[in-house]
Amino acid sequence: MSTFEFHTTKSIIVERDAALNLAARVQAMHCKSVLIVTDSGVLGAQLLDRALANFELQQIAVSIFSEVLADPPESVIYAGIAAAKAANADCIIGFGGGSSMDVAKLIALLAGSDQSLAEVYGVNQAQGPRLPLILVPTTAGTGSEVTAIAIVTTGENEKKGVVSPILLPDIALLDARLTLGLPVAVTAATGIDAMVHAIESYTSKRLKNPISDALAKDALRLLSANIHTACEHPNNIQARENMLLGACLAGMAFANAPVGGVHALAYPVGARFHVPHGLSNSLMLGPVLRFNMSEAEALYAELAQVVYPAASGTSFRCATMLIEFLQNLPAELGIATRLRDVGISKRNIPALAEDAMKQSRLLINNPREIQLNDAIALYKEAL
Ligand SMILES: NC(=O)c1ccc[n+]([C@@H]2O[C@H](COP(=O)([O-])OP(=O)(O)OC[C@H]3O[C@@H](n4cnc5c(N)ncnc54)[C@H](O)[C@@H]3O)[C@@H](O)[C@H]2O)c1
Ligand SMILES: [Fe+2]
């Protein structure tokens, strides 16, 4: 076995109604003033209401920053840092999907350190210290609560990542009740994003290791077995809990054995056309997996056994079953299936492909090398 390292969030709490105990968690960290970082959708869904009452009882001051936008731009991070300073916050809570959690990570980091946002882009540039940080996911998708990454949209349509173990929160708190009201389209797209995390981690050319493999397999098992139920019966708490846990396990896996080509080609779709992260991954999934078959067939066949425990036959047949399962999901769950459904046309492809080539951080993990002409062909196939 080759040498490897594995890092994750040190406390992970899985508890229905855990949100009610948020104030007690903050109290236990000896903090007196929290900034809750969220977006208008989460606020509108009234998910914070019950949590807030208990802060008053514990005499902990609470400020809410709800200006997070999907695929957060730099301006949102600056506004959040200002809000944290104005509130004299000594604890940050990220409460929402990947966008809110990523913004919370960066506010916690930059409100407590002398570095600027520009100085922390890239790998291991952040020096800290950061403020105490609790992350509470309300989508079952990104796994951001267990990843050492925060993603920011810079300028018009480029994304940059801050990657540092300092970004792992002190506590990840998984309360499936918070996901019961998640709209079907968001449930489907974020759930597929989580599956892509598991699959790309399992087939990662770099840093794949036995712990990430075990997590990726169990994540895919939970996600594939529950995504239909979660979409068709949104109030099924058991299915929601399995999705939330599956997304978290997939997050642990890809935080250590990173994602590849699907994400590299999905990012430009999200950045240029404001397509939600999960949906853009879902749109590129089929073409990239088929492209990877020549290098990853055996690994896809292993994953097929997770989705279909009775799968048998050649490795090609099993791998194809996995790809078909994933390829059929968007139509079955009622979300867009083609790039043209989200306003992309043939003339957009050269720019998308050029942007994808800039995602070298991700492309190096893909089991098969993707060159510019491959990227063009993959976007054409997804059109
Ligand atoms: N840090 C990481 O490891 C990582 C990994 C993948 C993606 N990302 C980033 O995460 C972001 C995507 O996150 P996401 O897919 O979770 O979406 P999101 O956070 O953008 O949320 C999507 C929408 O769902 C709404 N919503 C969230 N929870 C809800 C609930 N329980 N009920 C009703 N509405 C709810 C939000 O208001 C929002 O409108 C992107 O910015 C992406 O770049 C980060
Ligand atoms: Fe993702």
Image: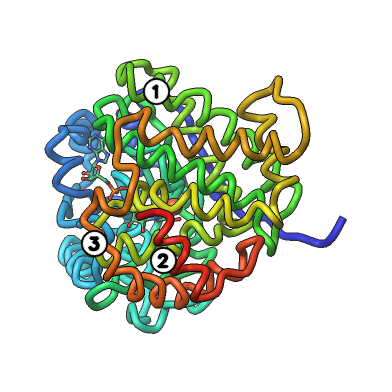
- Amino acid tagged 1: Arg
If the image is split into quadrants, where does the C terminus sit? bottom left
Q: Tell me which residue sits at (63%, 57%) in the image.
A: 257
Relative horizontal placement of residue 367, taking residue 69 as reference (left or right): right
The quarter of the picture where residue 173 lies is top left
Classify 337 as above or below 369. above
Q: Tell me how far mark 2 sits from mark 1, CA to CA.
A: 28 Å
Relative horizontal placement of residue 161, taking residue 317 as reference (left or right): left
List the residue tagged with mark 3.
Answer: 273
Answer few, some or many: residues within 10 Å of disc 1's Cα (few below 14, many 20 plus, some between 14 and 19): some
Answer few, some or many: residues within 10 Å of disc 2's Cα (few below 14, many 20 plus, some between 14 and 19): many
List the residue tagged with mark 1.
Answer: 16
- Amino acid tagged 3: Phe
List the residue tagged with mark 2.
Answer: 130
Q: Position of residue 53 (x, y in %)?
A: 18, 31
Please give the count of numbered marks on the rendered protein.
3
Q: Tell me which residue sits at (12%, 38%) in the image.
A: 44
Front-lying residue, 34 or 30: 34
**Can residue 123 be seen by looking at this rendering?**
no
Classify 22 as above or below 65. above
If the image is split into quadrants, where does the N terminus sit? bottom right
- Amino acid tagged 2: Arg
Instruction: Assign a secondary structure to mark 1.
Output: loop
Mark nearer the N terminus (2 vs 3): 2
Mark nearer the N terminus (2 vs 1): 1
Answer few, some or many: residues within 10 Å of disc 3's Cα (few below 14, many 20 plus, some between 14 and 19): some
Instruction: Assign a secondary structure to mark 3.
Output: helix
